[in-house]
Image (spheres, rainbow, N blue to C red):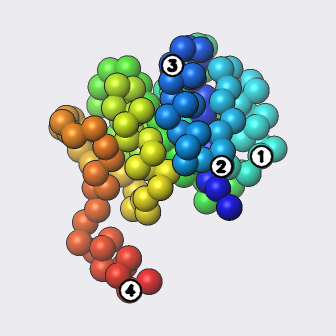
């Protein structure tokens, strides 16, 4: 069974770019507005929620909190145009992964195909020059993976 992804991005061009980069590895529902996305989060069963932090008058974190309350196994990725450390920490505290928009098209397939650690432990203040998600795993995470 393929991974199901709900992708929420208000900019139509960016939405098309992200969707085309992910369709090869997952089934994608791509939406541009918060209200429709909220209904999908409540009514659908998604493996991943990928949302822009800025959704016009709304905040993508609202969708993350809703997804966690409706289906705790849904993993979330929140991205933004510029590095905002306080919001990055809030995203990570919610259990979601934080990315910058310019890295997302390259990193997203790695998120969807790999085994993610339980939490995003990367330092949001530090820039990673590589184009893919690195994992951010600690040795304790690797020991748990080896035991399973």
- Tell me if 80 is positioned left or right of 12 in this view: left
Percent from the top left, x then y, of residue 67? 65, 46
Q: Is residue 46 above or below residue 141?
A: above
Number of marks in picture: 4
How far apart, in angstroms, are the residues tagged by discs 1 and 2? 10 Å
Whether residues under marks 2 and 3 lie with C-beta atoms below 8 angstroms apart, the answer is no
Q: Earlier in the sequence, mark 3 or mark 1?
A: 3
Percent from the top left, x then y, of residue 69? 67, 51
Whether residues under marks 1 and 2 lie with C-beta atoms below 8 angstroms apart, the answer is yes
Which of the numbered marks, if any, corresponds to residue 147? 4
SS for callout 4: helix
- Residue at point 57% right, 31% down? 19
Whether residues under marks 3 and 1 lie with C-beta atoms below 8 angstroms apart, the answer is no
Q: Quadrant of residue 140?
A: bottom left
How far apart, in angstroms, are the residues tagged by discs 3 and 1? 23 Å
Q: Earlier in the sequence, mark 1 or mark 2?
A: 2
Q: Which residue is mark 1?
A: 44
Which of the numbered marks, if any, corresponds to residue 14? 3
- Tell me if 32 is positioned left or right of 18 in this view: right
Q: Quadrant of residue 58?
A: top right
Q: Which quadrant would the N terminus be assigned to in this image?
A: bottom right
Q: Which residue is mark 2?
A: 4
Q: Earlier in the sequence, mark 3 or mark 4?
A: 3
Q: Earlier in the sequence, mark 1 or mark 4?
A: 1
């Amino acid at each position: 069974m393929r991974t199901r992804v709900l992708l929420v991005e208000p900019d139509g061009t960016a939405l098309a770019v992200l969707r085309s980069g992910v369709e090869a590895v997952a089934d994608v529902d791509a939406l541009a507005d918060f209200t429709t996305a909220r209904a999908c989060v409540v009514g659908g069963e998604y493996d991943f929620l990928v949302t822009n932090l800025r959704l016009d008058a709304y905040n993508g974190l609202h969708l993350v909190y809703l997804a966690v309350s409706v289906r705790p196994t849904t993993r979330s990725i929140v991205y933004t145009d510029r590095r905002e450390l306080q919001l990055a920490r809030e995203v990570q505290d919610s259990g979601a992964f934080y990315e910058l928009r310019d890295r997302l098209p390259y990193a997203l397939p790695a998120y969807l195909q790999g085994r993610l650690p339980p939490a995003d432990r990367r330092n949001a203040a530090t820039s990673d020059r590589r184009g893919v998600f690195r994992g951010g795993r600690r040795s304790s995470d690797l020991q748990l993976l080896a035991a399973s």
